[in-house]
Structures are given as structure tokens and as C-alpha cells.
Amino acid sequence: MESFRRELHEQGYVVIPGLGGVDDAFEVVQSFGDLIPQYSGKVTHEITYRPGNESRSYSQSTNTILAHTEAPGWPSSPAFIALYCHRQARCGGGHTDLLPVDELLLHLDPTDIRNLKSVLDFPGPPGLPGLKAPMLEYTDQGRARLRFSYNLLVHGEFDPDLDAVAQESGLPLGAEGRRLAQRVSEVFDKHRTRVLIPDNALLIWDNRRLLHARSEYEDKGRHFTRFWFTDGSAE
């Protein structure tokens, strides 16, 4: 397991193959850090198609989900995300795409970076206050850390109905935020790493260091279990 820890530290993500099931994945995640509750209050979330989400950019749809970090409006957003693959889509879609923040910043101009340092009102957990924070900030050690949601900047919410048209006056940064989201998406699409997680494998990545996204898919048998966990450091 030490080699996987080293790989996670060095590149920000790691794929651990050949697990015996979700219980094995649970034990592996616990060995990396402390599990934390997700949106439902449970420490696991099933990512598979659920009827009624056809027009949404949402984990339980088959649609593309564009670049974001997980739970950016939570006061303590998860340090790491893990996806255990019960069954990968057989259609060739459903990739998990990743891009380091440092790579993103190399391809943005000074205006983009200045806008990324803007303070946003991020919606919080259901029924709880959100968070006012900059999208881009730096740790005391100088490491870039990102809170970001394409959907929030373009649609004004995290899991939008894709047919809805948001007025710019209701968006966190208006037209400038929409432009920034499009630029980040362009860079993401060009420089991302595409991971098609094998069955019985676990993908772990650093949620503060990497943006992630998902490509659309057609095979509704695709099924993952998601975990959030912390590294124990202060936010």
C-alpha cells in the first residue's frame, strides 16, 4: 500500500486495482484517512443512473459533468475523493477526467487568475449556510488550492437542469464568471488525464489539488461507490 500512497502524493491520484469488493475498498480508504459524511449524511454515495435525472448535470444521470472540485461550499471540503468501480460502462464513456491545478494555472492569463482569486458565495450543505471564500488560494507552503464549479459560474447552482437559462445578473461573477468557466473548461479538455476505472478498482485523488469531471455514457449499468475522506490537516 505504501507504493500507492507515494503515487497519490506525487501525482495527486492513484488507481488501486484488483480489490475483492466494496468492503475491501472501504478498508483501503480507511487506511488512507478518516471517512466523512457526504450530502446525504452517509459516508458512501452510490453513483449510478437513477430515472428522473435525464436533463440534469448530476452524478446519478448519464450526462457529462464539467470541471469542478467536490463540495466547494462546505467549510471543510473533502481532502480526497475515492471512487470504487462495481461495474464500468461498457459503451466506452463514463471516464473520470483529472487536471492538476498547477497545470491549469500554466495556461491561464493574468485576468483569468485574478478572477479565480475572487471571493464567491458557495452554496453549502442542504439546510446549512454556505461559504464565502476565494476560488483560488495558497497554503502557507505556497501550494495552490482550488474551489471551483463550472456549473455554479454558468448556471448559478451545482446540479442544474441543463435546459434552464440563467440570467447573468444571478450568477456569482456574471458574464466574467461565465467566460472564466468556459476558459477553464477549454484548458481542462485539452490537458486532462482520462481514467476509465476498471471493474473492482479504486481511484483516489486529491480534491484540493485536482479538478475533475465525467464524460457522458450510455450504459446505465455503470455503478460506483463514492467515498470522501480527510487527511486530518486544517482547511
Image (spheres, grey):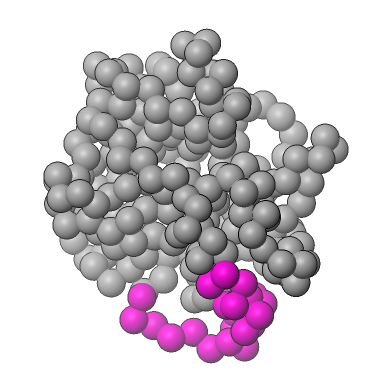
Q: Relative to the observer, which residue lies in front, 86 or 115?
A: 115
- Closest to the observer, 98 or 174: 98
Q: Which residues are magenta?
A: 162-183
Identify the image quadrant of the C terminus: top right
Does 167 lie within the magenta span?
yes
52 left or right, relative to 181: left
Q: Is residue 234 left or right of residue 180?
A: right
Q: Is residue 188 above or below residue 22?
A: below
**Residue 90 visible (yes or no):** yes
* In this view, 183 is above or below 107: below
Q: Nearer the viewer, residue 75 or 213?
A: 213
Q: Residue at x 28, y 72 (%)?
A: 55
State the residue at coordinates (50%, 33%): 13
Give the residue furthest to the right: 140
Answer whether residue 32 is visible to the viewer in this image: no
Residue under the image location 48 percent in, 18 percent down: 4
Q: Is residue 18 left or right of residue 11?
A: left
Nearest to the observer: residue 128 or residue 187: 187
Query: In the image, is residue 127 above or below residue 111?
Result: above
Q: Which quadrant of the structure image shows residue 109?
A: bottom right
Residue 49 drawn at (x, y percent)? 22, 53
Q: Is residue 8 magenta?
A: no
Across and down, in percent, residue 85 comes to 28, 34
Q: Above or below — where is 56 with respect to 225?
A: below
Which quarter of the figure has residue 180?
Answer: bottom right
Side of 225 relative to 140 (left or right): left
Quarter holding residue 54: bottom left
